[in-house]
Image (tube, grey):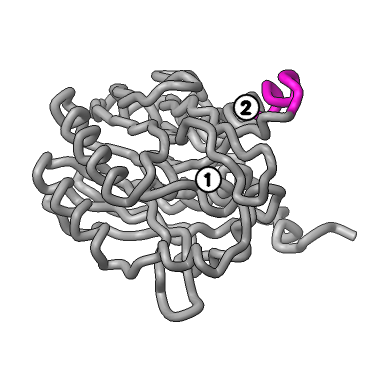
Amino acid sequence: MNTKSLTVALVQDRDHGSVEANLANIEARVAEAAGRGAKLVLLQELHNGAYFCQHESTHEFDRAEPIPGPSTERLGALAKKHGVVLVSSLFERRAAGLYHNTAVVFEADGSIAGKYRKMHIPDDPGFYEKFYFTPGDLGFEPINTSVGRLGVLVCWDQWYPEAARLMALAGADLLLYPTAIGWDPDDAQDEKDRQRGAWLLSHRGHAVANGLPVLSCNRIGHEPSPLGASGIRFWGSSHVLGPQGEFIAEAGTDGAEVLIAKVDLGRSEQVRRIWPFLRDRRIDAYQDLLRRYRD
């Protein structure tokens, strides 16, 4: 059985108050990750600033930037300096009035290997993303890199098994989720536990159903609401899963952390041989999945 060990790093952190402070912190964290042997580094969703989608304000569009642009130039140089594949998450200004939540993948030579525009856009209390982000139009296409084919998805995509499946069917070697998710601080503890548990379970399900490792990187800290509500307490818990949904590594709920793990990419084939879910799919019977609801 062919085995290939890949050292990965997930940079879990809080908002440091400005684009410059956040990028400077990322530079230090990526340097640490590379020093500990990482060849693939995953950052959290919208890492350049606060999670601004807690309200709807046209002023927040000033945060967006083109791709390529200032952040991709700096992050590309960072990837090249340390020889790592780097997965970032940016607020993309595609054109006037047209914006996306976009993951950008940098090759170890600093070039842009590819990008993914978030496909599923939420509109929940405190997560008013539909005001800001146009749904992605690049489809579910893995990005080829020197460490493998990366099935990059973003946060809310994690609740949709179809997205993970399509990445797997296109030959992804890993599934990666930059994420910004947390609790309403006013929720009861049992509700908080249910929400975090469901989030972890969804990722474990993607790993099991597709026989693939899953990496999810979340932010930490409390961010107040501009509307005077209770804000969001991001719950961290960034993690690396194996192809049977097992935890290889998991970060805490409170602290900044560079989570390091070794992933055996060869195990996916071993697991798929004993659990041949792709073989047994009844593709002739799934036509109704293209309907909104079977009524």
**What is the CA distance from the residue labelled 2 to the residue labelled 1?**
13 Å
Count how many numbered circles sit on residues in the image: 2
Identify the residue under disc 2.
196
Left or right of residue 117: residue 42: left
Kind of residue indicated by mark 2: Arg
Q: Which residues are magenta?
A: 187-195
Q: As rendered, which of 246 and 188 lies closer to the eye?
A: 188
Query: Residue sitting at 59 percent across and 56 percent down?
Result: 120
Kind of residue indicated by mark 1: Cys
**Magenta-span inclusion, residue 77:** no
Magenta stretch: dominant secondary structure: helix
Identify the residue under disc 1.
155
Task: Tell me the quarter of the image containing the N terminus.
Answer: top left
SS of the residue under disc 2 = helix
Query: Residue sitting at 33 percent across and 56 percent down?
Result: 104
Q: As rendered, which of 50 and 77 lies closer to the eye?
A: 50
SS of the residue under disc 1 = helix
Q: Residues within 10 Å of mark 1 (few under 14, many from 20)?
A: many
Task: Tell me the quarter of the image containing the C terminus.
Answer: bottom right
Q: Position of residue 260 (x, y in %)?
A: 29, 23
Q: Which mark is residue 234?
A: none
